[in-house]
Image (spheres, helix red, strand yellow):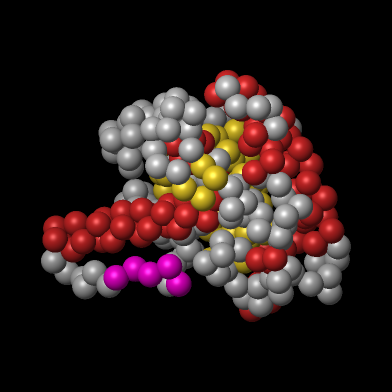
Amino acid sequence: MFGTSESFFSLPDKVKATVPWNPQNVGWEKMSQIRPSTGAPDTKESYQLQFGENMEGLWMSDAHVPGFREKCLAFMQRVQKVSERLMVCFARGLGFPDDFFVRVHDTTRPNSQSVMRLLHYYATRETNDGTVHHRAGAHADWGFLTVLFQREGQSGLEICPGRDVVTKFALGDKWTKVDLKAGDIICNIGDLLMSWSDDRFKSTFHRVKAPCEPGDYYGERYSIAFFNQPCKDAIIQGPKKKYPEVTGEQFTANAMKTYFAALNAKRESETTVTSSTNSLPVSATSITAGA
Ligand SMILES: O=C(O)CCC(=O)C(=O)O
Ligand SMILES: [Fe+2]
């Protein structure tokens, strides 16, 4: 799959721009994802793909990458199967029927919201001029469970598991490097599984570190994330009913709202400190929320 991903990202930007990102959380974006933890764009490009109706007109054509759609869907289906095995474990742990999470993450339904994201981080120069090239600023994924693939030797992923919800954007938290061998798969719990488990399973705070010290990896970096998200009509509530019931669609909308509010708050706090720039309101159409 990494070979197919490289073929896509090596296309000229004007070709990739024919499948642009939109707020259904699909399509290609470049340097447009701003994390509330950093307030700056990640130095990367990504292409988000789904199984269902949201992909209408957004698959890169065979003329540019032969067999692209077929190869991606075959890989997505394999990752879905791995995810389903994990979903059974989480369902058992929470006292739900074994197929509880599998049923609501049915990717054969047109209203499926699960996303595969191909990621490409640009190489950065080893400078000591204080410029920070954020790769993926600190965040927790807002979906159910993320299955993540990395390439051996392209390090940078760091985790801060079991975070306390109050330290939302990891200020002052301790980061642990994720050391990987070829074929390893990383599974990150997202905010949705956290609330669906009444906070029993904590979402995994993570980042791809901005390279800045000896030993950091400054080269081009490819990764693939598969975000399991429930179908739009899924009913979400933990066994102890700690939080009000919401649908899959409402959960996604709420996650976006929280994200943009955090981003605006970050922008306003920086404007107050520097008093130098106007803090323009950020809208869902001007930047990528991603995951
Ligand atoms: O590239 C990676 O290793 C992580 C990507 C990530 O965390 C995300 O896209 O949410
Ligand atoms: Fe992430």
Which residue occupies the foreground of this view, 181 or 74?
74
Q: Residue at x 84, y 70 (%)?
A: 62
**Residue 251 as seen in the image, left or right of residue 270:** right
Is 73 included in the stretch rendered in magenta? no
Q: Residue at x 34, y 48 (%)?
A: 37
Q: How many marks?
A: 0
- In terms of secondary structure, what is the magenta stretch mainly? loop
Figure check: 71 above or below 228:
below
Looking at the image, can residue 146 be seen?
A: yes
Q: Position of residue 186 (x, y in %)?
A: 61, 33
Q: Position of residue 8 (x, y in %)?
A: 72, 63
Looking at the image, can residue 127 be seen?
A: no
Q: Position of residue 160 (x, y in %)?
A: 42, 30
Figure check: 15 above or below 273:
below
Figure check: 153 above or below 30:
above
Q: Which residues are magenta?
A: 281-285
Q: Quadrant of residue 69?
A: bottom right
Q: Quadrant of residue 245?
A: top left
Q: Residue at x 38, y 33 (%)?
A: 242
**Residue 208 as seen in the image, left or right of residue 12:** left
**Residue 143 as seen in the image, left or right of residue 4:** left
Which residue occupies the foreground of this view, 92 or 28?
92
Q: Residue at x 62, y 75 (%)?
A: 17
**Residue 98 as seen in the image, left or right of residue 38:** right
Q: Position of residue 249 (x, y in %)?
A: 52, 56
